[in-house]
Image (tube, rainbow, N blue to C red):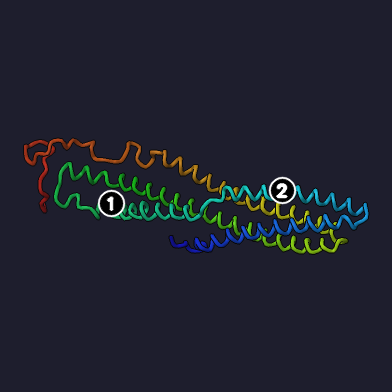
């Protein structure tokens, strides 16, 4: 399907996911390099500094594990925005659009209820038109709301991944510098400590991105709850779909002299 205005294309989104995977591989590579260089540096550092380095590496190990735990929550529940957008389009194009066209036609001036018939039948059908139009308009409003909520959720997924990608880019850049510093031996302790700070920071950013997305979805959930209540409400048609069956049309005779006679409308 074509991307909606303001959205990215499916190919662009796949590239974004591929970029995130590449960055995660870079995280693994740089963290491994930093640990290898720091472990070698311990042999050349005096006891005090080697102890500081060892403590920093333990802290970094725990933080990196936490980072991957948080990132896994997104990977295992990523959502597919284009499925949501496709469903949103279906609600508008296959339901809302046709219903809207029907609503425009469902009015006394657009129908030929009394062009050929007059009497109780014509009057009954004409009387029920406003109620039927109200019911149809309720369906259109519901389909619009479903379209809107599905589209908003899709856009929320785009924003979530954009935020995660920015956080990963910054994290990898910092890890590269810290891994390089660890190769100098004397720079290993501050490099390990700095990597811990960088990792704690990216954890905070990932958690914040997810929290914002959850908050955003929460506002949609409120709307969906209201929508669900509307779907189960009979306010638009309390007695079921409006019909004219309150009038007895079982007698289809044209002129037997009773009150249900049907006749061709004349100009009188």
Identify the disc placed on residue 167. Answer: none
**In the rendered image, which residue does mark 2 sit on?**
65
Q: Residues within 10 Å of mark 1 (few under 14, many from 20)?
A: some
Q: Residue at 31%, 55% (x, y): give it.
A: 101
Q: Nearer the viewer, residue 248 or 8?
A: 8
Residue 220 lies, in percent from the top left, at: 53, 48
Badge 1 element: loop
Q: Nearer the viewer, residue 44 or 71?
A: 44
**In the rendered image, which residue does mark 1 sit on?**
106
Work out whether 246 lies above or below 11: above
Residue 24 lies, in percent from the top left, at: 66, 57
Residue 17, can we see it?
Answer: yes
Q: Residue at 63%, 60% (x, y): give it.
A: 22
- Horizontally, is 247 left or right of 205 in the view? left
Q: Residue at 66%, 48% (x, y): give it.
A: 70
Closer to the eye: label 2 or 1? 2
Q: Residue furthest left?
A: 256
Residue 208 lies, in percent from the top left, at: 66, 52
Residue 193, can we see it?
Answer: no
Q: Residues within 10 Å of mark 2 (few under 14, many from 20)?
A: few
Tally the numbered discs.
2
* Residue 46 picture quarter: bottom right
Q: Which of the marked residues, 2 or 1, is nearer the chain's N terminus?
A: 2
Residue 260 lies, in percent from the top left, at: 13, 38
- Horizontally, is 80 left or right of 160 in the view? left
- Horizontally, is 186 left or right of 13 in the view? right
Q: CA distance from mark 2 to mark 1?
A: 62 Å
Badge 2 element: helix
* Residue 128 picture quarter: top left
Q: Quadrant of the N terminus?
A: bottom left
Q: Nearer the viewer, residue 43 or 117?
A: 43
Q: Nearer the viewer, residue 88 or 267?
A: 88
């Amino acid at each position: 399907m074509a991307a909606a205005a303001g959205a990215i294309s499916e190919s662009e989104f796949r590239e974004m996911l591929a970029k995130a995977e590449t960055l995660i591989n870079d995280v693994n590579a740089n963290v491994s390099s930093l640990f290898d260089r720091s472990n070698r540096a311990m042999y050349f550092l005096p006891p005090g500094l080697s102890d500081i380095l060892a403590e920093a590496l333990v802290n970094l190990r725990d933080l990196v594990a936490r980072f991957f735990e948080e990132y896994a929550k997104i990977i295992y529940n990523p959502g597919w925005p284009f499925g949501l957008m496709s469903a949103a389009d279906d609600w508008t194009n296959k339901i809302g659009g046709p219903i809207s066209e029907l609503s425009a036609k469902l009015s006394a001036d657009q129908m030929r209820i009394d062009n050929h018939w007059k009497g109780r039948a014509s009057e009954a059908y004409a009387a029920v038109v406003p109620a039927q139009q109200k019911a149809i308009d309720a369906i259109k409003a519901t389909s619009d709301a479903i379209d809107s909520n599905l589209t908003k959720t899709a856009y929320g997924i785009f924003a979530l991944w954009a935020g995660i990608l920015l956080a990963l880019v910054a994290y990898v850049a910092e890890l590269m510098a810290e891994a390089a510093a660890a190769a100098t031996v004397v720079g290993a302790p501050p490099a390990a400590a700095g990597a811990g700070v960088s990792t704690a920071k990216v954890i905070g950013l990932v958690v914040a991105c997810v929290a914002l997305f959850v908050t955003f979805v929460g506002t949609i959930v409120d709307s969906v709850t209201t929508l669900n209540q509307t779907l189960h409400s009979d306010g638009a048609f309390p007695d079921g779909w409006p019909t004219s069956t309150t009038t007895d049309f079982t007698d289809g005779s044209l002129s037997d002299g009773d009150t249900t006679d049907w006749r061709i409308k004349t100009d009188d």
